Image (cartoon, rainbow, N blue to C red):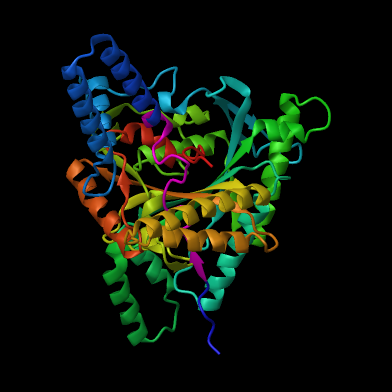
Amino acid sequence: MAAQERTYVLGGETRRRALFASSGRVIAARGVFLVVWMLVLLDTHSLVVLIVGLLVGGAGEFALARRTALGESWTGKVWDGVVFRFTHRRPVPDFVPGEALPPEVGEVRMLSYAPPARPNVPMAIVHHKDHARRSWATGHLTATIEIKGGGDGLLPVRAVNTSGLLFERLLGGLASAEIPVDQLDIATRILPVHPDAYREHMRGLVVAGTPARLRRSMAELSTAAAGNTEEYRSFVTLRIPLAQLAAGIAGPADLERVAEETFATLGEVVRRFDGAGYQLRHVLGPRRLGALIRHLHDPDVGIDTQEGIATVADGWGYTRWAHPQFVRIEGAARDWYHAVGHIPRDAWPQHAVGARWMEHLVTRVNPATIRTVVAQFRLVPKAQARDLARVGLTYDVADARTERRKGQVADGVTQAAMSASRRTLHDLLQPVVAGTYPSVRVMISAPDDPELLTAARRRVTTAAENGGVARIAWQDNRHHRALITALPMARGVRA
């Protein structure tokens, strides 16, 4: 009997669930407007004030409800454009290398730790300040490793299912409240391989005694595929809440003990990745991590090229120019243009998908395009995930009843969300299953000409749509700020 492909439902968070449909800022703005309008109206008793208030309020509600052709908030897009034009009135760089890092990076401390057994293999630890509370103690640590990814081309259905199940268990185990890890970022860097290098690799596979017909076939294959051949590198970044880490340390949580505990946590994560079939390549030290960040800004410089890198901060070594549709980096040899997008929650597939549903973004973008696909998982312990799923199902059931009571024609979104919420609650009854808030981001790059970047955006958008994604929300007017979400900093996901 042939193995059946294991499927997954990704529709539980297709929209924002809350008691009020609007965000807190919108509710606050409405409240301020109503208070001011009523005070002026009571003071003047003017019919003109009443009519003007009604007109302004109606226009505001219309603007808030309006959507762009892609389904995004029209008001938000206009506001982002106004803010961008106001903050970039003068033609000056958005960032110039110097003592400070880009503002979106915030205050960070760069640390390094090497275990006594391997003093020549340091681990880079980045301490991020909690800017909401203005406290280092409630901040978080990040560390990055390189793994050998599981993208092995076409695999039997059974192998794909096994890989997906192992990854499920990996996330479920790491989401345990006993492990001080609350976010996991898996970034796949895709780089085109030079055609000559690919042909040389294929020639190396032809051993002595190979039949002439097979040799000719291999040569034809290498010629046909050389232009679309890509190299894949995978990196994992852990986000470790400092307070949770320190709570598990017996005795004073000084810098040395924190570094030791971080290394131990990283070792536990590496063991779990190994059990899921992902082999460790490197633990990134300060120079390797800085080289990776520099490469993401300037792809002409290799990922493994460490010349000119002494610390992680040296990765931000290029002048940066902001533009509404991209961010331009003055690279060492030429200019590079980058764009960042993410898949919003209402654009995720609402039907059952396979374990490798994102492969369209990773392996099926033609012609070959420089890009980084980041799958970010905010880990939620089982008890908290169960409460969140229950609350979400409560909202969905209430919305469905409201639609029936009003006689509205359902659009399927509420029903899909209800189905996924019930599936989530059922899955959370199983062992080694916890909750995650997934987010997918993609960064694309092109040299010399922004038109090449525009073409790359179209290719990546098409590939995403072929995989069942409704749209990619490109961070127009914010690409220079959004760049941090594609770097190994574990930024950009909230539970």
Q: Nearer the viewer, residue 293 or 463?
A: 463
Quadrant of the frame with the C terminus: top right
In this view, 73 is above or below 410: above
When asked about the image quadrant of residue 52, the answer is: top left
- Residue 81 shown left or right of residue 479 in the figure: left
Determine if the magenta segment contains residue 17: yes
Q: Residue 216, image x and y in percent?
A: 31, 81
Q: Residue furthest top?
A: 43
Q: Characterize the magenta stretch by its predominant secondary structure.
A: loop
Q: Nearer the viewer, residue 101 or 478?
A: 478
Is residue 423 visible in this depiction of the protein?
Answer: yes
Q: Which residues are magenta?
A: 7-26
Quadrant of the frame with the N terminus: bottom right
Numbered circles on residues, count: 0
Q: Residue 286, image x and y in percent?
A: 56, 33
When asked about the image quadrant of residue 249, the answer is: top right
Residue in view at x 30 percent, y 40 percent: 338
In this view, 73 is above or below 435: above
Determine if the magenta segment contains residue 168: no
Q: Nearer the viewer, residue 71 or 132?
A: 71
Q: Residue furthest right?
A: 251
Is residue 277 visible in this depiction of the protein?
Answer: no
Q: Residue 448, image x and y in percent?
A: 21, 40
Residue in view at x 59 percent, y 71 percent: 162
Residue in view at x 37 percent, y 36 percent: 482
